[in-house]
Image (cartoon, rainbow, N blue to C red):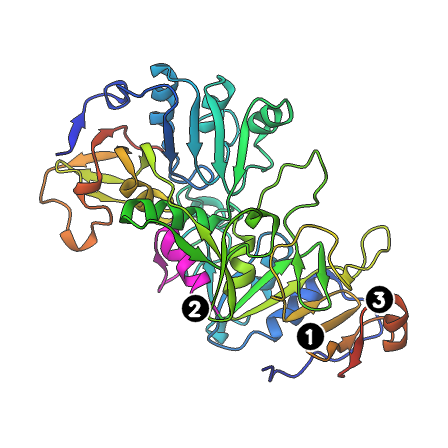
Amino acid sequence: MTTICTSTQEALSGIADGATVLVGGFGMAGMPVHLLDALIDAGPRDLTIVSNNAGNGDTGLAALLSKGRVRKVVCSFPRQSDSWVFDDLYHRGLVELEVVPQGTLAERIRAAGAGIGAFYCPTGAGTILAEGKETRELGGRTHVLEYPLAGDIALIGAHIADRMGNLVYRKTARNFGPVMATAATTTIVQVERIVATGELDPETIITPSIFVDRVVAVGDHQ
Amino acid sequence: MTTTTPTPSTDRPRTKAQIAAAVAEDIPAGSYVNLGIGQPTLVADHIRADAGVILHTENGMLNMGRAAAGDEVDPDLINAGKVPVTEPAGASYFHHADSFAMMRGGHLDICVLGAFQVAANGDLANWHTGAPDAIPAVGGAMDLAIGAKRLFVMMTLLTKQGTPKLVPACTYPLTGLACVDRIYTDLATFAVSPDGVEVLSVHGTTFADLRALLDVPLVDAR
């Protein structure tokens, strides 16, 4: 059952120190900023964050990082023109970084949600990102053994939910949302609005309610 | 493998725009193409509107449109460089795991990337300088390098210090092994072949000068 929450505070209750948190978004598109603000207020520490980037500007993920709540970041692309919060923490040795090729990041999360124990992937074979990993020749090509990446929590920005928790996304803000929703013990979603069950065309639903635990409406983000 | 007519040689080194135009010229009509962040995005300006080339952006869109301007800007509609883009008729959206399945699964015809170095055997280094204080950030580079059917590289042939970037073996950390097919530079266009590096055109230089400049086996294929 999906819980419809009346506040982001309610949506973010009960998150333990040391949790692994999957955070949707690609840059700011699909970034669940309201949920991240509530996560800061909720106060858990020593978090591992799994996200494509490591924060932009001073809001959202960057704000969480600046509060010193994050022990480790697993991402594909931390370094950006506006990633000064992460850059500073990294250079001061205050945050651990695991860099994962973007497609491998998505597929490891997908694997976690799909019950796959591990998979062989050609990406990164022969590079420093494959060092120490098991490899195997398959179809004449070197593959690297990659393991699933599950979260205790997933924080996702979607467009509209119905009261059952079915989700639709908007344009390229979809990005990591649908895969992350499948891969966490508790998936928490912010949407612009929640509509009555039946108002969303079942043919258009991208994330079915089975993957969604809590939804909160935060209004138009634009 | 290649069937396109090579760009004719010219007396002067090519500008970035001319390099981009040469790449665009070699993209067959109807191709599915991913243009990497940075210089490769210039290629889009030179693809003929009637060529039916479909652009893929790894953050989850096919048939991506041109850069958005004014009222067209929508924070939910961005490209891999996080630049706002437009949504032409025939566009589609998908999540990250599907987007990288398009890449890794060999569905994209051509990918165009920038490079720090390319080796004579087609090894690519374009994601990390390996400097001790550099924050490693790979993004989708490794997935793109090994995923597309053909990989074109765009770069200046020499570093600002005058050192060749087409080398016997990469000294920077690798992105992918033996993955580059074509190298478009200011001074020449090259094709990586089992017999050596083929020179397809020269610009403001000569084959003899290139042979003296580069420490890789060259074949005159003009």
State the residue at coordinates (24%, 49%).
Answer: A206
Residue B174 seen in render: yes
Q: CA distance from mark 1 to mark 2?
A: 22 Å
Relative horizontal placement of residue A175, taking residue B179 as reference (left or right): left
Q: Earlier in the sequence, mark 3 or mark 1?
A: 1
Instruction: Tell me the residue that label 3 is attached to.
Output: B215
Instruction: Tell me the residue that label 2 is attached to.
Output: B107
Q: CA distance from mark 2 to mark 3?
A: 34 Å
Relative horizontal placement of residue A174, taking residue B7 as reference (left or right): left
Q: CA distance from mark 3 to mark 1?
A: 16 Å
- Circle 1/circle 2 CB separation < 8 Å: no
Q: Chain letter of disc 1?
A: B
Relative horizontal placement of residue A149, taking residue B8 as reference (left or right): left
Is A139 situated above or below B129? Answer: below
Instruction: Tell me the residue that label 1 is attached to.
Output: B191
**Quadrant occupied by the C terminus of chain B:** bottom right
Determine crowd level at label 2: few under 14, some 14-19, many 20+ residues with C-alpha closer than 10 A. some
Asked which secondary structure carries label 1, the reply is strand
Q: Is residue B103 magenta?
A: yes
Q: Earlier in the sequence, mark 1 or mark 2?
A: 2
Q: Quadrant of residue B42?
A: bottom right
Q: Position of residue B128 (x, y in %)?
A: 66, 46
